[in-house]
């Protein structure tokens, strides 16, 4: 997995790393128990402060996406659905509302948004569990 930082981005560097790791996990590029580069190595490769990498890793660990194994490194955590189905659905609805609001403001039609979501969804790794959403 190659991480890239855009120093001209308005997004803080640690958030750029967080987004890249989140997306890599969602796409299946990073799988449970995959080891991430050590903080010092990644900071050296990206020419950024080690504290920035540590902050990104800490945020991802706090969200349950990474686990720190002392003396061994930082690894992708397994999926642990700790939220109730209702809480998971509510959390997704909050993200969807932001996404759809942005689509409206950018001038997309409902059909265009639906088509684009379908195209992008094919690039992600989905759970095989089937749960009904009401």
Image (cartoon, rainbow, N blue to C red):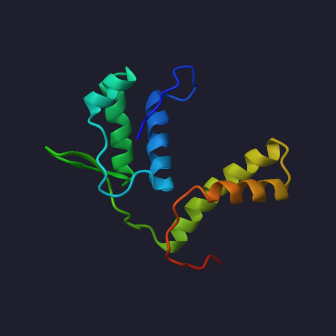
Give residue 97's position: percent from left, percent from top: 69, 55
Q: Residue at x 66, y 56 (%)?
A: 96
x then y, percent, for residue 100: 73, 52
Q: For residue 92, which quarter of the picture?
A: bottom right
Q: How many labels, in total?
A: 0
**Image height of 54 relative to 35, above or below:** above
Horizontal relation, residue 114 to residue 1: left or right? right
Placement of 98 over or under 134, stated as above or below:
above
Residue at 33% x, 26% y is 43
Q: Quadrant of the N terminus?
A: top left
Q: Residue drawn at (36%, 55%), measured in percent from left and top?
A: 64
Depth check: give the residue in front, 48 or 59: 48
Q: Which percent across, then down, holds residue 75?
A: 29, 50
**Nearest the eye: 110 or 92:** 110
Q: Quadrant of the C terminus?
A: bottom right
**Residue 106, picture quadrant:** top right
Q: Is residue 96 left or right of residue 46?
A: right
Q: Is residue 71 left or right of residue 6?
A: left
Horizontal side, residue 50 vs residue 3: left or right: left
Kindly identify the residue that appears in the image at 85 percent across and 44 percent down. 107
């Amino acid at each position: 997995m190659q991480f890239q930082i855009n120093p001209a981005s308005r997004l803080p560097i640690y958030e750029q790393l967080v987004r890249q790791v989140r997306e890599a996990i969602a796409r299946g590029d990073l799988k449970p128990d995959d080891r991430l580069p050590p903080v010092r190595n990644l900071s050296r490769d990206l020419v950024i402060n080690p504290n920035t990498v540590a902050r990104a890793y800490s945020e991802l660990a706090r969200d349950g996406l990474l686990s720190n194994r002392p003396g061994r490194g930082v690894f992708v955590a397994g999926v642990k659905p700790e939220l109730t189905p209702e809480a998971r659905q509510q959390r997704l609805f909050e993200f969807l509302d932001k996404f759809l609001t942005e689509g409206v403001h950018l001038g997309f039609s409902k059909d265009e948004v639906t088509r684009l979501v379908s195209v992008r969804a094919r690039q992600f790794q989905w759970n095989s569990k089937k749960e009904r959403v009401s």
